[in-house]
Amino acid sequence: MHDHTPDTRPATLHARIRAEVEAHILSGDWKPGHRIPTETELMLRYGCSRMTVNKAMASLASAGLISRNRRAGTTVARPRLHSAVLNIPDVRAEIEARGETYGYRALLDEMRPPCCIHLGAEGHQMGRSRFIRSVHLADESPILVEDRHIFLDAVPAAADVDFGQEPPGPWLLGHVPWTEAEHRIAAIPADAMTARALSVPLGTACLLVERRTWRGAETLTIARQVFRGEAFDLTARFGPSPTGG
Amino acid sequence: MHDHTPDTRPATLHARIRAEVEAHILSGDWKPGHRIPTETELMLRYGCSRMTVNKAMASLASAGLISRNRRAGTTVARPRLHSAVLNIPDVRAEIEARGETYGYRALLDEMRPPCCIHLGAEGHQMGRSRFIRSVHLADESPILVEDRHIFLDAVPAAADVDFGQEPPGPWLLGHVPWTEAEHRIAAIPADAMTARALSVPLGTACLLVERRTWRGAETLTIARQVFRGEAFDLTARFGPSPTGG
DNA sequence: TAGTGGTCTAGACCACAGC
DNA sequence: CTGTGGTCTAGACCACTAG
């Protein structure tokens, strides 16, 4: 996609340590839960002082990639939720928080590359993708229709999951660590498919959220979610990051 | 607003140093551009080593509150833009990036408290507020209608600005440091006012963005922006934070 | 050129949690 | 109890840059 190499050429030692540990995690080499060498081990391995290692690890910890405990040592963090930035993904929790019962129904599940509207020129390079169209319901009433592509080269485990019962979103969040996400948000009038799936008149104002998730340079999944108008709000809250600790 | 005291009782020294410097900045005591004591000065003041001071300052720098230069020392950072999280605010840049000419027209400018829909119980405590309704145009065609409240107790300088020529958003971004922002995003059908302001049929799908901005516990401004349907996308991109630097 | 932040060291003590 | 991370020190050298 970009022609410049990532070019992570850390000038300083702590940056290099951080980058190398990060690479192990992002490549999947070190899975969630994997025990990372202790500060003392890394100190010896890199021939530096413990403070330098500590700076690298503290940085990774504040980024949420690792979790640290006194006696337990340092482990690769479980994939986190959307760190409170854009709290849409857990539709189920949203619905249940409103006291309604959550429902899920898969409409389609097939191998299909994402249609061109989702992608640029790199579309044909993304390999096999599983496509799931589903509807999420609140008290039996459809609230959200979701078209999702999962790229099996990046997430091979997704090939064996039964998305007839379990929505792909939560499964992905729980099993696949990601490093970057991009959202596109727009208001659209309901088209024919959407209107039928959501039981609303044609043209009803709906909220479209397209989410694309990466691990490193690899696209993991693309979700196109259309929320029934007025039924859902997106909220996003942020500030100068909890960098303190 | 909250009954628990902020209770920032930093257990560690570097956290305390960070908190105290941060307090000077957030209270407005140290304005943007203000020169912050050098690491050596702070080291003496707190009777600790320079490393400890450095940890506190590095944390503030990565949070974007201060900017550091070798010879020039450390200064309070100019208020930053939306740190690439939710890039809506600069409507003008968006429009010009599409090769269209940007236009701005103020429709209303008066002293008026925010209507109850925007606020909870604390609404009556917010003091004087300036209300500006404006339209932003792309090639003479309205794209966005904005209702904005600016709370003059929090932003007294805003009382003297001529928002007939300059939109309040960019002015605020450039002059007022904020610490937290919350967005509510929804799809709505255009009501009568909106339809007229945007020259669209009643009921057209529009994108509503409500943004509320704080400095500490103090609300600075509330903006309610309605974008003409299909004319604008919101994009949000993020990952595990660029904590490295 | 002088002063600043950026980095690093080789120690140290402590708090905590698993054994 | 023991090993781990969290913190802190009292130095040091270097790179950058404003004056």
Image (cartoon, coloured by chain):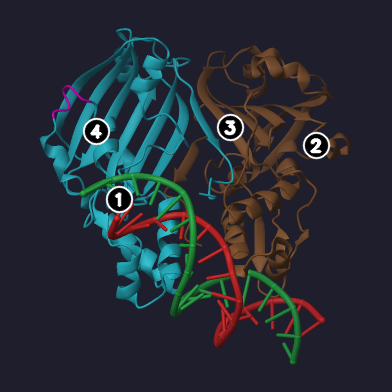
Chain colours: A brown, B cyan, C red, D green
> What residue is pinned by disc 3?
A182
Q: In the rendered structure, which amino acid carries the disc numbered 1?
A: Ala
Rendered position, B143 above or below B65: above
Q: Between A86 and B36, which is closer to the camera in this rendering?
A: B36
**Residues packed near mark 4 inside 10 Å, few (<14), some (14 to 19) or many (20 plus):** few
In space, the residues marked 3 and 1 are separated at their CA atoms by: 37 Å
Q: In the rendered structure, which amino acid carries the disc numbered 3?
A: Glu
Q: Between A199 and A150, which is closer to the camera in this rendering?
A: A150
Rendered image: mark on residue B171: 4
Q: In the rendered structure, which amino acid carries the disc numbered 4?
A: Trp
Q: Which of the marked residues, 1 or 4, is nearer the chain's N terminus?
A: 1
Residue B125 screen position, x and y as percent: 22, 53
Q: Quadrant of residue A103?
A: top right
**Residues packed near mark 3 inside 10 Å, few (<14), some (14 to 19) or many (20 plus):** some
- Is B27 included in the stretch rendered in magenta? no
> What residue is pinned by disc 2?
A155
